[in-house]
Amino acid sequence: MTQQSNLSRRQLLTAAGAGLIIVPASVAGASSAGASTRAAAPAAAPYPSRTVLTGAQRAAADGWSALAGQKVGIITNPTGILTNLRTIVDEMHEAGTVDIVGVFGPEHGFRGTAQAGDSEGTHTDPRTGLTVYDAYGAGAAKMEQLFRTAGVETVVFDIQDAGARFYTYIWTMYTAMRAAAATGARFVVLDRPNPLGGKAFGPMMTTKYTSGVGAKEIVQAHGMTVGELARFFDGEFLTADAGRRLTELSVIEVSGWRRDMPYAATGLPWVMPSPNMPTPDTALVYPGTGMFEGTNLSEGRGTTRPFELIGAPYVDYRWAERLAALDLPGVGFREAYFTPTFNKHLNTVCGGVQVHITDTRTFDAIRVGVEMLVAARALYKDFVWRYDSYDPARPYWIDKLTGSTRLRDQITAGAGADEVIGAWQAELREFDARRKQYLIYRGPAA
């Protein structure tokens, strides 16, 4: 992206191509069909040599004209940046061309000062003087109230997603979409690449186990950008949940990205979407090793490699040996020892493994996670599933992460990874077929 400073606005727009999708509710079906045809088209080269530009960068290059004449509410966090590494809110505010009536902070907050499960609260941003509303944990009714209080006419969403169903930003977006449908506000997504690529993996969420880490029925690694997800949510869920679809949904596309392109090939800077997502490799392993949040093993929080270091005080060298013997594609397992500085097993030495990705093209995070769970359950009598007494009807966190009791029941009963993974293949195929009409970007995985 070092060439960015040498590109004129005209050159940027030429490179970007036509990427603004306007989806009025009345014509969304026709638009979706076009997207499906485009997404399925084959690409000639492994990775295009042109620069990847985010939706935010393209909107900025056009002087934010897509937001002109509207009272704008922005849902973003530290990932909502341009190639100059400045946040879109600061850029819009200083440009003076966008009427920002409020910023809405998700989990971890607008400026990113809060840890997991926390927010910054409603406050006045000291840099811009704008009101920042606390949107973390807000339901649709609360979000609607916030939009009405701020006088929002256009909602802008710009957050880098991690690609897993239990990463909460996509549910903040869906809640905001419901609120926008209720208020008649326009909804604009400044799109960014999915760091996992464009292929869907994993089990389906079931209605009984929906929660803040999986509010609707999608699979565990959805394989869509947030722009594509917004189209999917609008077409599949909003009418039932909000009584109507969005008045207008606009996706300002990423240019130069394909579904099979790893994040490292984009040339885009990686900004931590949350405190425990420090690198693109963290995002790659997260849909699988994130399941260890549902056990008594540390998922590496409180270390410098969260979700890559997994272990517990009772784990020894046998786990790494068993996992290495599986010879899984695209991954290696190193025997590791670590001491978390917060969260599970605080200040206690844990034995375990570090997950090393050796080939992003063949690495399957969810299979890796399942194989790790199966082996840990078989090796260690001290392995237990996390039990939350505050939710006696659904006490096991792993069920909320995976969408049902099935994975926990199978592994507890001694099932192998092939049996566990095989159980969700039919629902995965159905989801994959259903999402195709909402896809935007090209690539073999579409």
Image (cartoon, helix red, strand yellow):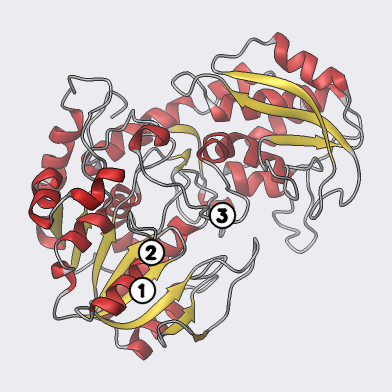
Looking at the image, do the residues carrying marks 1 and 2 touch, with CB atoms under 8 Å apart? yes
Q: Name the disc covering residue 86, or none.
A: 2
Local SS, label 1: helix
Q: Name the disc covering residue 213, or none.
A: 3
Amino acid carrying label 1: it is Asp
- The quarter holding residue 255 reads top left
State the residue at coordinates (40%, 36%): 263
Q: Residues within 10 Å of mark 3 (few under 14, many from 20)?
A: many
Q: Nearer the viewer, residue 58 or 132?
A: 58
Amino acid carrying label 2: it is Arg
Question: Disc 3 to disc 1, how far (Cα)?
Answer: 30 Å
Relative to residue 120, is residue 3 drawn left or right? left
Local SS, label 2: loop
Q: Residues within 10 Å of mark 2 (few under 14, many from 20)?
A: few
Q: Which residue is mark 1?
A: 90
Local SS, label 3: loop
State the residue at coordinates (33%, 54%): 83
> Can see residue 44?
yes
For the N terminus, which image quadrant? top left
